[in-house]
Image: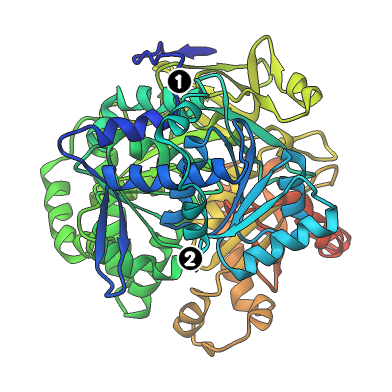
Amino acid sequence: MREFSVPPLANVPLDSNITDLVLRQAAKSSNPALFSRLDSAGQWQDIRAKEFLADVSALAKGLIASGVGAGDRVGIMSRTRYEWALIDFAIWFAGGVSVPIYETSSPSQVAWNLGDSGAVAAFGESDHHENVIRQAAATEGLTSLTHVWQLEGDGLDTVRAAGAAVSDDELDARRRSAGLRDLATIIYTSGTTGRPKGCELTHGNFVELSENALATSLSGVVNEQSRTIMFLPLAHVFARFISVLAVAAGVTVAHTPDIKHLLPDLQSYRPTFILAVPRVFEKVYNSALTKAEDGGKGAIFHKAAETAIAYSRARQAGGAGLGLKLRHAVFDKLVYGKLRAAMGGEVAHAVSGGGPLGERLGHFFQGIGLQILEGYGLTETTAPVSVNTPERIKIGTVGVPIPGNSVRIADDGEILVKGICVMQGYYQRPDLTEESFADGWFRTGDIGQLDDDGYLLITGRKKEIIVTAGGKNVVPALLEDQIRADALVSQVLVVGDNRPFIGALVTLDEEALPGWLQRHGLPADTPLGDAASHAEVKAAVQELINQANQSVSQAEAIKSFRIVPSDFTEASGHLTPSMKVKRAQVMKDFEAVIDDMYTSPKPSRT
């Protein structure tokens, strides 16, 4: 199949916008809890729709009184927390446009986002963030930036107090100033290469996409009885869309700013669904495996995992046999129930985006009782173009288009997208906007295919396809995903463009490494650098590569590899905030290592 479209199921008035979603919830007699926060005693306290509306209105009045006009851009630089969502909606109530900034951004990156967007004000989470914003403004001469407020301390009280004289009528007029086709936010791509581009997302992108998603069986997952905990960065489009979708559905949303606290927060908050990128699910699986192996129960876990995968595959194919059902029931008591309890005990669904999850992990989690609804999208598409739903799920794919969206596969395999999800364009870059569209279809840069039922399968990034010196086209993700699935490995980068054979850079998982070393009779405290050059570690990585090579042709197989003695991280500049490897930066920084791989007498034997 070359093209698949799903007509919209929800019609939204042109004069409406994101703020109407809050008013809709506040008008309900149930007055649903839209958010939940930890109080000083460590207890979760609900914030209901009417309370949220009142505070959003007070802050919006303060923004209006401080000179933020309709269409003005306002930056937000903070970790994921309740106040992030509060300010986001306040900016929209004031008729403004939000400009999210990753809280780990450098002054030069902050200056680019605020300067390019022409922001008139910004919020920083703490003293540190405020200082970074002010430093950026001073260094780059951002004269339009007239206000910088903090989320902590009395910063928000200052904004509230400033709006005391603004009337309800003035606020309502400002709130109504934007319609579906008006700009809601400019999200700068985290960027694996070059300067970030500002994606212009409209109120319609968020509202129409939310309403049409809720018109599917996703409404059984996302509704007033649902709870989720947000730990992905709200500066990223995936978490941002879910934040708006949750308000549209009346979901109660909690936030945890530090992923180190995620496990206890999951257990105390007990969400019914979560959202994460594939790397999080990989870490959950690998952490459980490592813990089992460290406790001498590795064999049991492996059998439990195989059973979960087989059970899920059998059910997808039509039904599991009695023997498999019995094994599954045994492991549910021994293993699966404990995994679900670690996530709070009530999680039944998870939404995965930001990259391909992989069929094996999808079946594993489905088999333990956590249905992962994998979807696909980019910043330019307001996150989801397509998604698996509870009633229409095919593990290994990213689902069918959300109603109102269309997917087409170009002659070269590139995925093209059209519909309610697609951005207006790149801010102040008509040249890039024109390059990115072909006859009204947005060029995603991803390679994929549609099956006979309209389900989309992602196979790689167009710009990451490697062409060897012998002319062989290789899709790195096919190999990388398989190798990275092992607990010992953290990251993999397949290389070989214009080279005689395919090679790979591999990093080790620092959390899993000590246990692995101990189980193999090596000192658990062996430094990462020493472990990277140890013969037994190299042999283990070689075996993983051998297994991955079985899925590709000889010409596509990895012939040589190097274990890098440090991990790729956001701090090192090798990962984006959404955990994608910055391929060009890694290849630049490890150029000498890659060159050595190709100048050695012969590649490693596989």
Across and down, in percent, residue 307 comes to 26, 52
**Residue 571 seen in this snapshot:** no
Across and down, in percent, residue 273 comes to 29, 47
Q: Nearer the viewer, residue 348 or 565?
A: 348
Identify residue for label 1. 451
Across and down, in percent, residue 516 comes to 48, 77
- Image quadrant in which the C terminus is located: bottom right
What residue type is disc 2 on?
Ala
Identify residue for label 2. 487
Q: Residue at x 67, y 83 (%)?
A: 530
Q: Residue at x 55, y 19 (%)?
A: 181
Above or below, 169 against 539 in this view is above
N-terminal of the pair, mark 1 or mark 2, is 1
As helix, strand or loop, the secondary structure at mark 2 comes to: loop
Tag of residue 206? none
Crowdedness near tag 2: few (<14), some (14–19) or many (≥20) residues, C-alpha within 10 Å:
many
